[in-house]
Amino acid sequence: MRVRKRALGLIGGVCCASAFGVGCSVAQHQVGASESASALPAPERLYLFSADDLDRAAELVKAGDEDLVRARDAIIAGAEAALAEPIVTVVSGKEGGKFTAPSGDPRDYVSLSPYWWPDPKKEDGLPYIRRDGEINPDRDHYDADKLGNFGEAVRKLAMGYQVTGDERYAERAAEHLRAWFIDPETRMVPRMQFGQFVPGSSEGRHSGIIETNRIRFIADSVEMIGDSPAWAETDDAGVRGWFKEYADWLMTSKHGKDERNAENNHGTWCHTQIAQYALFSGNTGLAKEIVQEGFERVRDQIEPDGSQPHELERTVAADYSCFNLRALTDMGIYAEKVGVDLLGYETDDGRSIEKGIEFMVPYVTGHEEWPYQQIKPTRLDMYNQLFRMATLNMPHADFSDAIEELPPLEGEDLWMVYFWPVTD
């Protein structure tokens, strides 16, 4: 499998290269017997994706590449399905104060901590006790799934718009975004004060902050619909303003400070989120400051052999190893955009993000037996995502062979083939 590398762009007064300022060829293709779709020029600014990659994907579709055509068609199918999904916000399902945060404001996000269950030895079950890796189904009553479903709906619609130019997708994505971030009646309060509460112990914990990684594609989605008539300047300013407020809260609140200090994936994701939100809201100074944390995390979280002790102690150790590596890789991509080389960083004794990924390859491709706990099937689709991002963004990495050894992406996961195309 041959991999084409691309240059990463820089922002914030540094340099703006191919990833942040070039148009793409418009690919014409047929969808079914009579419906046609045209890929739009790539946005000038992207975060986890790149204009170069979208250029190449569109060119491959135009050339009739079967894998890319199939991925394009899956993206359109996902966008069509998302059109039919109702707009559900943070206030939905909280009529009469049900499942509302202790603040009493239905716009405050609230979620039950996933691995905490009633104590069977107590009549009232309080305080809850921890069962790592086992998700309490009562969690479904609160806001985590609503946030995740919103993020997925917007991603699907924005991607559909990018590959077709169909204004229906941009219009619906805009409606979702206004409902979650702008409409004063339904706008989520930009904080996570009541995330992952534990009955009998806490009204909300700093660990709840990790749940906003469920909207990690919102920034790219906004850029993709940015030129649509459905997306006004006031909409754009409103959404970016929300993320500025949230980044400020993450930097100044006790929860934010405590989460940033977490030694495992929680701390990594907190710093990674702040980096993205800072870039998205125009605070490149904060982004450049916060990504420096990545160097310390490489030194402290990854061993010279690539293992991650904080994640290997979990009952789903393979999933958490991937989870932390995805956070570090995301952070490294944001770091490149402000002139900081985290993705190519290696300590004197060999610790690096790339080494962490290499450590996992023989296990997830089935060449070696996983020697740690994994009480549920490993999320191999997430490793496919990680390997693609690493291959396209790291200076010398090539995980294309590992991608070929994973189960092929199907259905809704095929969007990764288009947005992270690792082959010509």
Image (cartoon, rainbow, N blue to C red):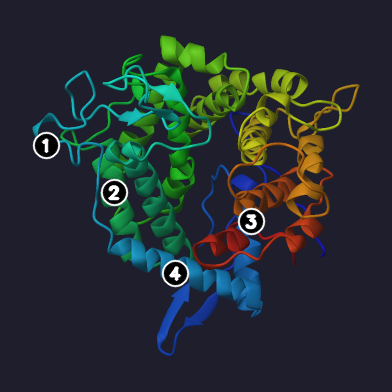
Is residue 1 toward the left or the right of residue 9 in the image? right
* 106 relative to 199 in the view: left or right: left
Name the residue beneath numbered marker 4: 76
Residue 180, placed above or below residue 108: below
Image-quadrant location for residue 417? bottom right
Image quarter (top left, top right, bottom left or bottom right) of the C terminus: bottom right
Ranked by sequence position, the earlier of labels 1 and 3 is: 1
Is residue 389 shown above or below 135? below
Q: Nearer the viewer, mark 1 or mark 3?
A: 1
Residue in the foreground of this view, choosing between 43 and 160: 160
Give, as a three-letter code, the residue at label 4.
Ile
User: Is tag 2's residue or tag 1's residue first in the polypeptide sequence?
Assistant: 1
Q: Which secondary structure lies at badge 3?
A: loop
Q: CA distance from mark 2 to mark 4?
A: 18 Å
Please state which amino acid type lies under the numbered disc 1. Answer: Glu
Distance between the alpha carbons at the discs numbered 1 and 4 = 35 Å
273 or 375: nearer the viewer: 375
Residue 30 percent coordinates (x, y): 49, 83
Between marks 3 and 4, how big is the CA–CA gap?
Answer: 17 Å
Disc 4 crowd rating (10 Å Cα; few below 14, some 14-19, many 20+) is: many
- Residue at image mark 1: 95
Residue type highlighted by circle 3: Trp
